[in-house]
Structure formats: structure tokens, C-alpha cells
Image: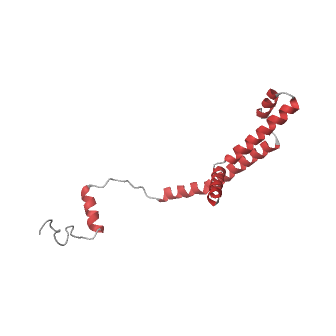
Amino acid sequence: MFRQLARSLLVAALMFSIGLHWVVLQSAAWAGMIVSYSVREGSLVTGLSQTFDAEHPCALCDAVAFGMKQEKKDSRQKQEPQKKLLLAIVILERPFIAVPPSQNSKVEMMKMFAPERDLRPPFPPPRRGVA
């Protein structure tokens, strides 16, 4: 029970994070518009054309458009300081060229950071079948 609820909440959070809620709301608005315009005009073709001609938006379509515009504006405002920070880091960092290390430099680094030790065992391994 708890696992199913957790999965459902995770799916809902992911849907909201990628903006899928706007698609669901817009689809519901279009479905309602198709029905109402078709009933009012008496023709399905006229209802479909009025739904998708962008000249007859419903209140839900306006709300979805406003919400998407606000969300884009908010995301632009959030990203602006990150760009400035990245630019400041790039300007302040001195240029650096990565050169692949040679075999000698690897050995020197190992000698500098690794403690010196003898890789041989402290005594010889046991012999087999001495009985």
C-alpha cells in the first residue's frame, strides 16, 4: 500500500517537473472545447476548427497559457545568477592545459604519495605435499 502510494507520488512529481501537467490541462481544455463548440454550432467539423484556430480560446486555455508563460519567466530568472557565477569562475580561473602524464611522472607521483614498502611476502609461501 505504502509502496504504491510512494510510486504514485514519484510519478506525479516527475510529471510536474517536466511540465506534463500543462499538457494534461490543455488536452482537457481542448476536449471540452470540441464538445461545447460542436454542440453549439451543430457540426463536429466546425467545432474542431473553432477549437484549434486560436481565435476562440476558453478560460482554461488562457489559464494554461498564462501559467506556462509564468513558469518560463520564473525559470529564466532562476538561471540568470548561475550564468553570472559561471562567467565569474571562468574569468577568475587561470588557463590550464591538461597534458597526459608520462610513465616516469606516474612513478614519481607514486613515490611521492605512496609509502615505500616491499611487495614481497615477509616469509616464503608454504610448500605443498611435504610430508
Quadrant of the frame with the C terminus: bottom left
Point 76% across, 33% down: residue = 52
Residue 61 % position (x, y) = 78, 42
Would residue 1 be found to the left or right of residue 62 on screen?
A: left
Of residues 123 and 81, the one drawn nearer to the viewer in this rendering? 123
99 vs 31: above or below: below
**The image quarter in which residue 9 lies:** bottom right
**The image quarter in which residue 3 lies:** bottom right
Point 81% across, 37% down: residue = 33
Point 79% across, 27% down: residue = 45
Of residues 29 and 5, the one drawn nearer to the viewer in this rendering? 5
Would residue 84 be found to the left or right of residue 64 on screen?
A: left
Residue 97 % position (x, y) = 38, 53
Point 87% across, 30% down: residue = 41
Quadrant of the frame with the N terminus: bottom right
Residue 67 % position (x, y) = 74, 49
